[in-house]
Image (spheres, grey):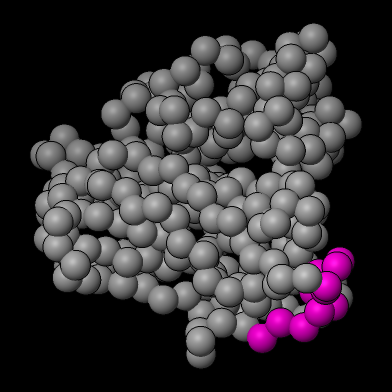
Amino acid sequence: MEDEEERDDSDIDDPGGPPPGVLFRAAMLPEYIRGFPLHAAITLRPDPPGATLRLLPWPTLASTANAIGYLLTEPGSPHTVAERIPRPVIAMDPDDPGLTLPSHGAYRTLIDLAPLWPPHLPAGQYRLTLLFISGFGRAETAPFEIAYRDPTLEEQRTLDDRRPEIPRGGTWFVWSRAPAADKPTLRGPFAANDPLAYLALQRWFLRGDDDLADIAPSTLDVLPPLYAPEADLLRAELARARGDLPTFDALEQRLLADHPGFRAHLDDIRDGHSELQEINEARRARKR
């Protein structure tokens, strides 16, 4: 189809046999609120599992890499309410080789659909199918039943208070990395029903003035199950900052059992080279 990137056999390890593809799975929240992030957790795997796929678009929470789209319908109706067909661009620069899915591997990440969302979509119940397009074809998730609603008065106040902190033209992800004029306010409180809780916690860890060793891991317990692996990664960061290697090892074992793609990130945390560990060391140095 015209939206797909061309592929040659150099993109896979074993070009013999049926052409491989990407197995695309996702998890979503049951409800989303206008104006807030629309987070989904996606997992990409080679199909068949023994294939190694290279030069894939690399979606992250910062960007969907033009590889993620969606079909939105009303429940019980084939009528398409809105659609976004992705048009990925795969970098051929050897310094930017894109994403590699190793044999029997997997890549999980959070993404934000808000920048792709139809701005005037009415509140209501919808059936959402996510799309991933690469040089290996088009992959779809199973459809999700989601609710989309307008913010309450309290939620609107939250939007009004926090939107001025977003740099011009930025996203909620950019907000999560923005410096804060009043660092103590980054400490929360955090609530399970706050759509910004995960990003607000990230912002505190990145831009706050607290040593990661002094932050209670239980602070992360407010996050919904959608964020469970990412919450464990943050718990691993806290454990490493405390020098609590038994807890770190237990978290690592739990994470890698289901998410082998986290190996490099966990290695960086263990070695003190993750972004949060390096920021925390710089924070400590300033206080000496």
Tell me where residue 272 sits by quadrant: top right
Does the magenta stretch mainly form a helix, a strand or a loop? loop
Seen as rendered, the residue at the extreme front is 17
Residue drawn 20% across the image and 49% down it: 148
Does 286 appear above or below 161? above
Residue 250 visible in the snapshot: yes
Q: Is 248 displayed left or right of 220 in the figure?
A: right
**Residue 207, position in %: x, y?**
58, 38
Magenta-tinted stretch: 6-16
Does 148 appear above or below 152? below
Residue drawn 47% across the image and 75% down it: 86
Q: Is 268 displayed left or right of 144 in the figure?
A: right
The one nearer the camera, 3 or 190, is 3
Residue drawn 81% across the image and 42% down it: 264
Count of numbered badges drawn on the protein: 0
Residue 2 is inside the magenta segment: no
Residue 11 is inside the magenta segment: yes
The one nearer the camera, 6 or 248, is 6
